[in-house]
Image (tube, rainbow, N blue to C red):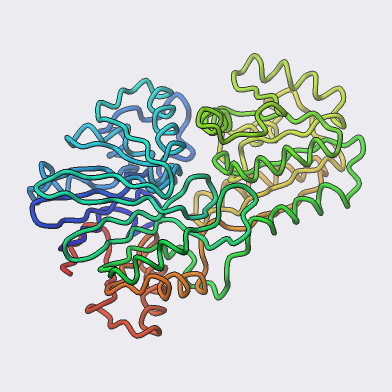
Amino acid sequence: MKIHTIGGYSEVGKNMTALETGDDVILFDSGLFLPAIVGVAEREKATTEKAMRNLGALPDDLYLERRGLRSKVRALLISHAHLDHVGGLQYNAYRYNADIVGTPFTMEILKILAADSGMRIRNRIVSVNPNSSYMVKGKKKYKVEFINMTHSTIQSTIIAVHTPEGVVLYANDYKLDNSPVFGDKPNYKRLKELSKEGVKALVVDCLYASDDRKTPSEKIARGLLEDVFFTTDNRNKGMIVTTFSSHIARLKTITEFGKRLGREVVFLGRSLNKYITAANNVGKCPFMKDVRIFTFRNQLEKALKRINKEKGKYLIACTGHQGEPGSILERISRNQLPLRLSHDDHIIFSSKTIPTPINELNREQLERKLKKFKVRIFDNVHVSGHGGREDLRELIRLTNPEHVIPSHGDLKKTTAGAKLAEELGYKMNKTVHLAQNGQCINL
């Protein structure tokens, strides 16, 4: 058995891993490197595979061709709906004579992304419910399980591939949330069962492996939002909250609290519309009836003119928490939309800045613009969707893999995960394996 570390081992993003067993290859994820495309003007956005590769936005899956493995790919298994895991498929899935398989929400996002880009995905797209299985057919047959896992978007999974040498677990991304506000808890029962059956390898998210903490439950983020919404004076003030468009549980909380305040809840932005539409299409958006969504320029401007007259009657949720150029909040900060910020309006960042230089710079510039209006800024009203060091410890103990392969980060992040595995008795380069992009691990 070999694990090929194609993307997401030298950076945060463009996740892709290949499992080679016998004459068969199974791919996990195909994501974008978002910093490569943040800040690219709308009119200049790349729309072709070649352009995206030139930007460095796609995993280097040409690696498989160089090693004569492309024709052996039997399936593309997608862990969840974030762009750094699913966003590359519309550009590179055509290269493989293989099904794309994931949960209903994840597959719905893929279809919407492709349609929005005017691209056609020719592969068969297969939806598999969380805690269900799928058979991959190659030279041999492989049972694949999509095991329910909590994260910052719905229907996220740990993928388990049953091979003759044991189970390979792909755990990008995860958090161990025992009281989620929407959806089910992690399927600990099945993970324990698999540990007894024998886990050959665990490929695992180490984004926050260096943080000495257990990541708090989403219910804590709900409490933080409740505190801001209901214990600060926002009467007759504008209220704008910005968060990740894919965070359906967080958007549900925002909607519920907006209603409790007696405000009309308005969602602004195309990205929000994509994720909300996908969730609604698979029956996972119970709050859809309680929000109004505006996306296109004319309807946006018309709505904001109305809102601007009586800001105290509305709660706005919008894009822009990373300070992305061209996002709704960034355009509001430059007076490019007909909503005028004023003294003591509330700007709530229900998010954390993703730690890349371009994001940090964009976010800093956005805050500087907002502060000119003397608004009240509430930052980091948020909990992460990624496990910390103590979550990683729990996951390794729970699954008891023979081999640990740290992933989802640069060498500094994956090294922190490897050192934790060493604390738990694993041996560097023997049972815990540090790799960067484009390497092969023989197990």
* Residue occupying the point 37% across, 40% down: 128
Which quarter of the image is occupied by the N terminus?
bottom left
* Residue occupying the point 61% across, 39% down: 320
* Residue occupying the point 35% across, 67% down: 411
In the rendered image, the vertical position of residue 201 relative to residue 102, given as above or below = below
Residue 364 located left or right of residue 413: right
In the rendered image, the vertical position of residue 59 relative to residue 307, given as above or below = below
* Residue occupying the point 34% across, 55% down: 8
Which quarter of the image is occupied by the C terminus?
bottom left
Residue 273 located left or right of residue 89: right
| Location of residue 207 (image quadrant) | bottom left
Residue 118, x across and y down, in percent? 37, 20
Q: Please name whichever residue, 128 or 62, is drawn nearer the observer in this view of the structure.
A: 128
Q: How many marks?
A: 0
Q: Please name whichever residue, 131 or 304, is drawn nearer the observer in this view of the structure.
A: 131
| Location of residue 432 (image quadrant) | bottom left
Residue 376, x across and y down, in percent? 81, 47
Residue 327, x across and y down, in percent? 59, 34
Residue 284, x across and y down, in percent? 56, 36
In the rendered image, the vertical position of residue 287 relative to residue 146, given as above or below = above
Q: Please name whichever residue, 388 or 32, is drawn nearer the observer in this view of the structure.
A: 388
| Location of residue 44 (image quadrant) | top left
